[in-house]
Image (spheres, rainbow, N blue to C red):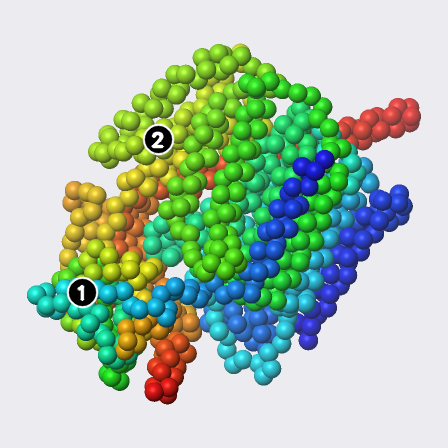
Amino acid sequence: MWRYAIPAVLLLVLGAFFYRGLYLNPTVVESPLIGKPAPEFTLPDLENPEGTVGTEDIAGRYALLNVWATWCVECRHEHDFLLSLAESGMPIYGLNWKDERAAALEWLDVLGDPYVASAVDEIGDVAIDYGVYGAPETFLIGPDLTILAKHIGPLSTPIWEARFAPLIESHHGAR
Amino acid sequence: MIPELGQFALILACCLAICQAALPLAGAQTGRRDWMVMARSAATGQFVFVALAYSVLTYAFVVDDFSVRFVALHSNSDLPLGYKIAAVWGGHEGSLLLWSLMLALWTLAVAAASRSQPLEFASRVLGVLGIVSAGVLLFTLLTSNPFDRLLPPAFDGNDLNPLLQDPAMVAHPPMLYVGYVGMAVPFAFAVAALLTGKLDRNWARWTRPWTVGAWIFLTVGIALGSWWAYYELGWGGWWFWDPVENASFMPWLMGTALIHSLAVTERRGIFKSWTVLLAIAAFTLSLLGTFLVRSGVLISVHSFASDPQRGLFILMLLLLISGGSLVLYAFRAHNLEAEGGFRLVSRESFVLANNILLVIACGLILFGTLYPLFHDAMGAGNLSVGEPFFNAVFLVPMLPLVFLLGLGMHAAWQKMNPKTLIGRLRWLGVAALLIAVAFPLIAYGSTGVMTVVGVTAGVWVTLSSLLEPVSRWLDSRAVRLTRAQWGMFIAHLGVGLFIIGASVTSAFTIETDRAVRVGETWEIAGFDIEFRGLREVEGPNFIADEGEFELRRDGEFIATLRPQKRIYRVQTEPMTEAAIDGRMARDVFVALGEPLGDGAWSVRVQYKPMIRFIWFGCVIMALGGLLAATDRRYREPVRERAEVKARVGETAKQGSH
């Protein structure tokens, strides 16, 4: 009566997956974009609706692309860190995702503006190209427009020092 | 010194659990009576020592013994006494100890009730429970000792996670654990039946009340968790398909299938191997729940320990206990012969359909919960499966299930003329559909396809559950319902109310987030809400901004709501304490968001019609279970014994004449 053995076999298969799962870290979601060229975009500038912000503005130096929105609570938590980072000279570009212009401008006015410029992605097309799960997300983009790293969730000093800063230094060192 | 006593008690409990596992099982196999009778005393002893260890840990919390690592990590001298006692299960090590305590309690109850069962069978049941207990106690002692010392001792504790400092959260884990662990009892009965090679209707009669008992606690535990998530996480949702929630829901679904399958086995002596398999599956999923939460294999908002070593131990335990029983099942299940057959239209068929659909639902949730893991383990990277997947997929087996449920309650055993069944229920179905079309339009002024489908399903089950009790109440000559039948109808009534609540809430909830200043008034769903003021309040271990909102309808005062934004002093995480004006017909939910500067605050207000029906429905389900589990026929052995005593007494009296 082989059919009575089916449950035991299923459990064994499940067990094998669990064993494998124990040694994987589910909090690291590696983006398939890492090491690939950043998807190109040109979008309206938040503060100057006539003008545009795009990948060509970012090119030429190390820069951050930070996905944010006023409806995003975690974005508020990382805001102070972004301000201090901008002060230290790191160029940060914003991707204002599925947001209202007026609310976004008020946010920057009240909390301070860490961004060189913010691109307005009202329908979220560019966010899809970048594989954005939710806000906040931050991409480190190299001078040749290669995506070097991605962080999901609010950025903070420990994460910056562990995951982003070494990449910038190593590239500097190689030069 | 006292914590070491606790540790010593735990080691003794573990030794006794090993005795309780080894001797009775070996005795039953070799027919040695003196070994078999050890089961009860070992179970009693084990309970005493686990309870002692548990009390010692509680004592360490109460007296703020921060030289105990676990206490230092999860308590603080400012924590109110009630939360200090509850903090025992606020972390991994202590909650394992609670698990063991619950298992020891169930074992003790099983041992006490087993006197009417054959000694060989009772010994095997207690032996299997002993294996589970020994495994969990070893796990506690080897990987997660709650009595580990911290040297030098901490000056003050790290405080209990603020999310857990809440009355519902105090009650939720123990309830859930009683339920989880209770599933070990039908599991032990099932394995004992496989070992004996005999499974008769008496077996089903012994197993049923235990299964329903565990299921009641699971039901209440899950409902409490949902209620807690609703007002404490500050989002206003009541179910998130979070891995940990799913981990508690899957054993519930299996347990529900098992209850129904057991009913058929008791009544008709069929579905035997299937019932055994469900009993094993329900407990396996309970263990899996522990595995998922403890190992960090899946991330979730409320898993506390992520440690591969612990995960590996639980995995081995799972493979040993569930794998072992399934291998036994593979060899023995064909011995369990059916004692009869049944026709296509019969109570049996409906229960079979119920079982298949519940197992499919459980399988889909298991798949959705584990899919990220499969994906990752195959090297395809990590991803997550969200609420939309579960919401859509869960409906597929559930809709036919509730339709059949309304019919199945009224089907006769063995065979039934389908025309009689349809004739009785036809008008009920039409009425349900009419109510479902009219009610949302009248009450909320709009409707939609899913709303009509959902409300029809809910009203259909509700009316169908009421049909029999009401018609018997109207007809004074009718035979009265037994307590078990009452239980069945009431539990199903709970299901109907739950479905109505869930459908209406998801269709007509109004959510608004807006920036408001003190003095502003705004309108939501016909209510006026005024932001009256803001003040700072101080709790025992937190400070909070407390908003005062006045709720009015047509200018008439309804309630004052005071939501808080708390900052706990030690763990500086901000916490949202929503304020809710709850009525049976609707909730108005106010939560303070963030200060936006210039005295403006973001405020979330939600209007949730009939959301109380969700938890009320669960309570009714549990009540139905309680009635069913306490039916006379489960108490009969006791009565028989009382009769025998009475008879013996009479003979004695006659003798003295």
Looking at this view, is B419 or B184 the one in front?
Answer: B419
Locate residue B167: give its quadrant: bottom left
**Horizontal side of residue B185 vs B548, given as left or right:** right
Identify the element where label 2 is drawn: helix
Q: Nearer the viewer, mark 2 or mark 1?
A: 1
Residue B594 x/y as whole percent = 26, 65
Q: Quadrant of the N terminus of chain B?
A: bottom right
Identify the element where label 1 is drawn: strand
Residue A165 x/y as whole percent = 36, 81
Q: Which residue is mark 2?
A: B453
User: What residue is rendered at 23% in x and 34% in y?
Assistant: B446
Looking at this view, is B365 or B118 the one in front?
Answer: B365
Q: Which residue is mark 1?
A: A42
- What chain does mark 1 sit on? A
**Residue type (three-letter) at the residue carrying disc 2:** Val
User: What residue is rendered at 23% in x and 49% in y?
Assistant: B551
Locate residue A147: give its quadrant: bottom left
**Horizontal side of residue A173 vs B102, given as left or right:** left
Whether residue B491 is visible, yes or no, is: yes
Residue B304 x/y as whole percent = 51, 64
